[in-house]
Image: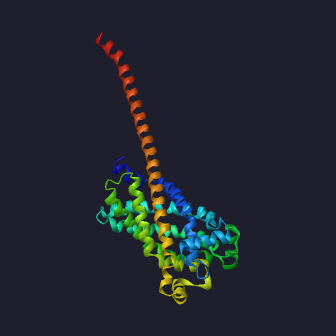
Amino acid sequence: MNFEDYETLPTQNSITHMTAGAIAGVMEHCVMYPLDSVKTRMQSLRSAHNGSIVETFRYMVQREGLLRPIRGMSAVVVGAGPAHACFFATYEQSKHTLSQLTRHRHDHITHGLSGCLASLIHDAVSNPTEVVKQRLQMLNSPYRGVWECARHVYRAEGLRAFYRSYGTQVTMNVPFQAVHFVTYEWCQSRLNPTRGYEPRAHLTSGAFAGALAAAATTPLDVCKTLLNTQERGAEGLVGAAGLVLRTSGPRGFFKGVAARILYQMPAAAICWLTYETLKHALNTVELSEESSETSTAGSSLACATLRLAAAEVPATTLTRT
């Protein structure tokens, strides 16, 4: 499949992007969920034994059970599918539109801006499930399941609780996705200049983009965790930042940075590979169907032409007689 088939055609098909994006999002979050739980626990102000990734994971398994690191995964399954479907569809459509408007003269700006727009939609869909997920991940969480947690939060704190961290989430994810997409597209231009389906290039580009974006936005992720879990009643980004500074000092803004990078590298690689693979497969099927329809139409036209020619032969013979 050449560049025009792979890049131009998929941009017109939002269903392809939404399907591929939903599956990619669920795969990404489920496979890497245990490390996400470790990251959340390391960022907590009240968790014990959270000095390193190994120490935190060992403590969770030994003291709270083997399945503790995957508690709350069902919330991710519910939220990641729709959020990533909207995310990739918005990104592809924005990239296509902006590329046409700029005539591909400012691709880095186009990719970054498209990522920012996609992030706004993604966060609006995923923020409630992020709140539930992180409350279930906390040490001594009183909730037994996703729905119990969601009901309790709604009754005790109202609908606002599910979007208390939305401003911080957007403040974090807009630069995160801008860095992520610009880096991914830049890596693709170096590793995969033809922009065809190249699994190794997608994996490498995704991993590098995820690691760089994760490291750059860890301080905001720490603040977001405090707002979602409501440790010590943090309110707003400024309030959360002040709480981190008072309790842990400047180093507190980078709590869990290693876990976050180790989470985002394979997560982004899995997400991009899954997305590009499904996009490639779905569009190969679409192209095959279009080719089949074209072939069928051509055959029908040929048959009609032959029948018409056959009908004209006797008339011509009679005229000559």
Q: Residue 108 in the image: x percent, y percent?
A: 33, 67
Residue 70 falls left or right of residue 306: right
Answer with the quarter of the image where residue 51 lies. Answer: bottom right
**Residue at 54% over, 70% down:** 124
- In this view, the residue in front, 7 or 47, is 47
Residue 318 falls left or right of residue 82: left
The extreme bottom residue here reads 246
Q: Residue 255 in the image: x percent, y percent?
A: 51, 79
**Residue at 42% over, 62% down:** 206
Asked whether residue 164 appears in the rendered view, the answer is no
- In this view, the residue in front, 71 or 224, is 71
- In this view, the residue in front, 62 or 225, is 62
Q: In this view, does 94 lie above or below 40?
A: above
**Residue at 69% over, 79% down:** 156
Answer with the quarter of the image where residue 132 lies. Answer: bottom right
Locate the C terminus and report the quarter of the image it occupies: top left
Q: Residue 18 in the image: x percent, y percent?
A: 50, 57
Q: Is residue 306 above or below residue 29?
A: above
**Circle count:** 0
Q: Residue 270 in the image: x percent, y percent?
A: 48, 59
Asked whether residue 46 appears in the rendered view, the answer is yes
Answer with the quarter of the image where residue 236 lies. Answer: bottom right
The extreme top residue here reads 321
